[in-house]
Amino acid sequence: MKINPKIDELLNSFIDGELSPRQQTEVQRLISHDPQIGQRLRQLQKCKMLVSSLPFVQAPPGMLENIKTALEREALPIGPAAGRSPSEQRAGQRHLFVRKVLAVAAMVGLVAVLAIVIYSIVAPRLTPEPHIVATRNLPTVVEPVKPALPAMTAKFNGRLELKTSAFIEVDASINRAIADNDLLDCISLAREPDASEYVLACSRKGLSLLLADLESIWARLDSATLLVQTKEFGRPVVVNAVAPQQILEIAGQNSLERSIEVAKDFAALNNMAELLPGKEVLTAINDRTSDLITGPRIPKPVLTGWPKMIKESTTQTTFAPAKVNLAITVIVGK
Amino acid sequence: MTEATNINIDDALLVEQCRLGRSPAMERLILKYQNRIYNVILKICANHDDAAELTQETFVKVIENIDRFECRSSFYTWLFRIAVNLTLNHCQKSVRLRAKSLDAQDDEHSEDARNLLQEFLSDDSSPDPAAVAQNKELCRIALKALADLDNDHRAVIVLRDIEGMDYARIARVLGIELGTVKSRLSRARSNLRQILETVCNEDKSKNR
């Protein structure tokens, strides 16, 4: 018997009571008019009846206990964990989440700190051009030397005491040299009636340029003394009769220790030169009031031509980028 | 009217208490539905051990996810949806179903059983359903025929004729359209009828 699937669907819906009253009436009319449809309806009804008549089988005993055991195994809120409500569990989960977030944040912070520390050790140190530490009072307190700096960045700290009878000229020359070399930003000045102090904080290159221009005043000086600050406070190395080239050489060393050693050498050398015979000649040469000055002047061998050398050397020599702190004091000579 | 408004008040209360972690409410829900769930699963998977295991798994999953139940459908529908999905997944994976049909280890039926079925299926008979239920041979044949259906056809017949769900609820449990339920149920019954007729005709084909 071949039945249209749509008719089958309609008959099944009729059997299951899923039709509206109008559809039910329609199906009943179909059945009464077509014996085949009536027969098909009875076949489907018997299928339904056969399945519906199958015995109801109850769950095996102990199902509840088995489910509870399975839930306990999975740590669900039954049995031992029954005292904790889902809301409490959610709160616990939130707490756990916050702790995890905090732990991650702490880890990130720790890594950042470590990165900064490592960077500060590994990365090249850039030393910006220093600014002036200025004071109006004498003696000037220069910015303290930072301990344990690497060799190439060690500061040179020194004091140059110039005594001269031609105070005004010397002072004017120094001012002009400072202006000519664009060192106004690196100099602070303290001035008294019979003394001036220039506190210079600049690069070694700046110092060399300044000293090259100051060479001309050396002939007018009564004395030039360089005091190089050592690590022992109050015990500087004193270099008497210091020449500009010597100052430059002392300040141009790559380490503070080396600068001190060179200063000591020059100090010894200059002291010996003072004791050598013929000092009188040197004094006469340097003394402007001497009779010798009226005659043909003997040029000072050390100073002759050295400004040119300094100027050239500044272009040829690569100076350490380190800072130089030099206080130049000009005092009226006695 | 949506199903949510028809939600069984008792179930809703038990579900709410379940969410608060009350063990007695969970136990009541399990005791209330365990037999029906087991019976439906057994009729679909046709194996007692598998049915027990799947019933247990169903309730564990339900209680695990009770917080996610949004009351858009009734708890009953949600529960049966989980049970049927688990069972159908199991049936798809299992190769035992064909080999081990419920209470019918061999495909042979006695002549008495076949005669009984023939009499039952004859157009003129109108047997008492209670009498059919008490006839173990007939039940055995019916279970065998049910097990021979496709999984989808078996599920829709079990939900309608054993669990007694209406078409709309079957659609929600199986996650299909209402029209699909009608056509699938129609084909399932038609196939079941053919299987039963084949059983009746076994004797005739052997005698030829």
Image (cartoon, coloured by chain):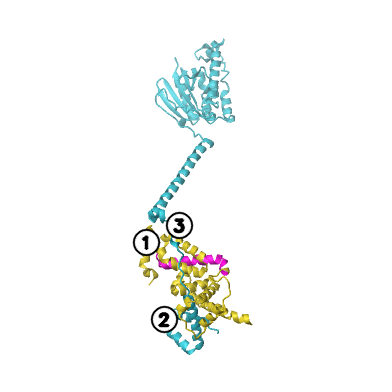
Chain colours: A cyan, B yellow
Q: Main secondary structure of the magenta part?
A: helix
Give me the disc on residue A234.
Answer: none
Chain at tag 2 = A
In this view, the mark in front (3 or 1): 3
Query: Residue A183 appears at what percent x and percent y?
Result: 48, 30
Q: Is mark 2 on a helix, strand or loop?
A: loop
Query: Residue B199 appears at what percent x and percent y?
Result: 57, 78
Labels 3 and 2 within one chain: yes
Label 2 neighbourhood size at 10 Å, few (<14), some (14-19), many (20+)? few
Asked whether residue B77 is drawn in magenta, I would say yes
Q: Is mark 3 on a helix, strand or loop?
A: helix
- At horizontal 51% and vertical 87% (from top left) the residue drawn is A36
Q: Mark 3 points at which residue?
A: A69
What kind of residue is marked 3? Answer: Thr
Chain at tag 3 = A
Asked if residue B25 is positioned above or below residue A97 in the image, the reply reads below
CA gap between label 1 and label 2 equals 37 Å
Q: Quadrant of the N terminus of chain B?
A: bottom left
Part of the protein shown in magenta: B70-98
Which is more toward the observer, A192 or B165? Answer: B165
